[in-house]
Image (cartoon, grey):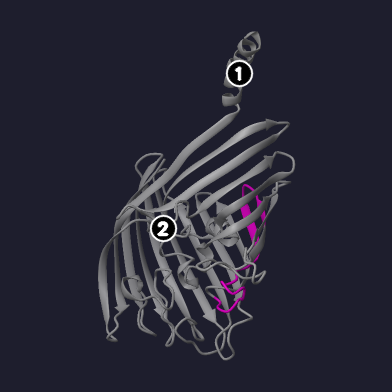
């Protein structure tokens, strides 16, 4: 009895210390608004326009739970569970409980962080910071048909500490299939990997990324769905203006013969913080595909240019209004949409114009962050 009493007393004394060294945070953001697009191709060969209620035009609505526990000596355990939301119908992205992040790991102040689980693919985690429109609906993802905002499962990741402004991130996603090391499960990507080097300073930031995103069969067969990527981006801050530019080269060496197998992608933009509440952003994005024909899933040789103008107005530290307008100009064989729509999209998911046709769009909405 005395032993039980002493043990209970020790637990009572220790519990406040344990709780004081642990933290769990509920976080998220909710985005809702209205969107307009014209020149959407129809099955009959014509085109139409649409007005739709949309959630996530400025940024994906999400709900997350993250936490850490101090293990002593500068070492902590960490976790993050995060899912994308569609506020217009109350569903989660892709039907997954945690569609964006689901990982656990260890973080050390001296040696960095290592984690395992599902996460944003490395370029999705790295490109948005150099996109003037931070991967909104009309943004850097549009002219690569969403190639730079994917998620991958079975990740092993490492994030280094910041050393004189430099840091490194590496990611390796296993396919987890017994019938082929590079293969993936149905509905998943195959083995994929990447590395990212970044330098941050008060005046400018520079980032380089190399990654390989494989299809379910473990191959790189399409520049916009499964390919090799080389990315370099820079931010420069001058007074109240931030200038952002980037270059990306995509290559898909396993593309069937005769189809376009590489693309070069550029963008340049700037954001002006007019006041503490009001910011205005303008940018131009350009993609050029190499020589080659196309089919239902592969874009042919051609090019497209997208011009985007947008603004945000802060109502508080957590809530802001936004508005964005954009224009897409396609070459004769290109059919890029202002949205990051796949080439083979059908039904209500399709927003692509007819080949060679331009597209104009706009959206307005409200974002709340918590």
Write the start and end of the magenta stretch as one range. 197-223
Point out the image quarter for the N terminus.
top right
Residue at coordinates 55% horizontally, 71% vertically from top-left? 266
- Label at residue 11: 1
> Which of the pair 18/225 is nearer the observer?
18
Task: Confirm whether the magenta stretch covers residue 37.
Answer: no
Residue sitting at the far top: 2
Residue at coordinates 73% horizontally, 46% vertically from top-left? 163
Point out the image quarter for the C terminus.
top left
Mark 1 falls on what kind of element?
Answer: helix
Query: How many numbered marks are there?
Result: 2
Mark 2 vs 1: CB contact within 8 A:
no
Q: Is residue 28 left or right of residue 360?
A: right
**Which of the 4 image quarters holds residue 226?**
bottom right
Q: Position of residue 357 (x, y in %)?
A: 36, 82
Label 2: few (<14), some (14–19) or many (≥20) C-alpha neighbours in 10 Å: few
Q: Position of residue 317 (x, y in %)?
A: 41, 39
Q: Position of residue 322 (x, y in %)?
A: 35, 53
Camera sees residue 209: no
Earlier sequence position, callout 2 versus callout 1 = 1
> Which of the pair 45/193 is nearer the observer?
193
Q: Is residue 131 left or right of residue 95?
A: right
Distance between the alpha carbons at the discs numbered 2 and 1:
41 Å
Label 1: few (<14), some (14–19) or many (≥20) C-alpha neighbours in 10 Å: few
- When the figure is inspected, residue 362 is found, relative to residue 66, above or below; the finding is below
- Label at residue 90: none
Mark 2 falls on what kind of element?
Answer: helix
Camera sees residue 12: yes
Task: Confirm whether the magenta stretch covers residue 215.
Answer: yes
- When the figure is inspected, residue 170 is found, relative to residue 183, above or below; the finding is above
Q: Which residue is mark 2?
A: 95
């Amino acid at each position: 009895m005395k032993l039980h009493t002493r043990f209970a007393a020790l637990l009572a004394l220790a519990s406040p210390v344990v709780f004081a060294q642990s933290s769990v945070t509920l976080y998220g953001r909710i985005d809702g608004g209205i969107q307009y697009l014209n020149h959407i191709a129809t099955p009959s060969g014509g085109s139409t326009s649409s007005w739709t209620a949309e959630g996530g035009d400025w940024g994906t609505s999400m709900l997350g739970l993250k936490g850490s526990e101090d293990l002593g000596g500068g070492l902590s355990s960490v976790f993050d569970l995060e899912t994308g939301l569609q506020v217009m119908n109350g569903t989660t992205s892709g039907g997954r409980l945690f569609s964006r992040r689901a990982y656990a790991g260890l973080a050390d102040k001296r040696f960095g962080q290592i984690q395992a689980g599902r996460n944003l693919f490395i370029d999705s985690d790295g490109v948005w910071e150099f996109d003037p429109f931070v991967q909104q609906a009309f943004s850097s993802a549009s002219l690569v048909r969403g190639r730079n905002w994917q998620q991958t499962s079975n990740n092993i990741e490492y994030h280094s500490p910041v050393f004189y402004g430099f840091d490194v991130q590496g990611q390796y996603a296993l396919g987890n299939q017994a019938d082929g090391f590079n293969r993936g499960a149905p509905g998943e990507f195959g083995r994929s990997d990447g590395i990212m080097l970044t330098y941050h300073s008060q005046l400018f930031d520079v980032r380089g990324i190399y990654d390989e995103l494989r299809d379910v069969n473990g191959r790189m067969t399409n520049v916009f769905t499964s390919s090799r990527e080389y990315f370099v981006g820079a931010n420069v801050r001058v007074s109240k203006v931030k200038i952002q530019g980037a270059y990306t080269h995509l290559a898909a060496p396993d593309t069937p013969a005769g189809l376009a197998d590489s693309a070069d992608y550029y963008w340049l933009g700037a954001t002006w913080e007019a006041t503490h509440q009001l910011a205005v952003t303008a940018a131009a994005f350009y993609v050029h595909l190499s020589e080659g024909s196309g089919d239902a899933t592969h874009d042919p040789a051609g090019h497209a240019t997208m011009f985007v103008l947008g603004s945000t107005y802060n109502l508080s530290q957590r809530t802001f209004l936004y508005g964005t307008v954009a224009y897409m100009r396609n070459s004769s064989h290109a059919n890029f949409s202002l949205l990051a729509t796949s080439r083979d999209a059908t039904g209500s998911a399709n927003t692509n114009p007819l080949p060679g046709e331009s597209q104009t769009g706009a959206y307005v909405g409200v974002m709340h962050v918590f």
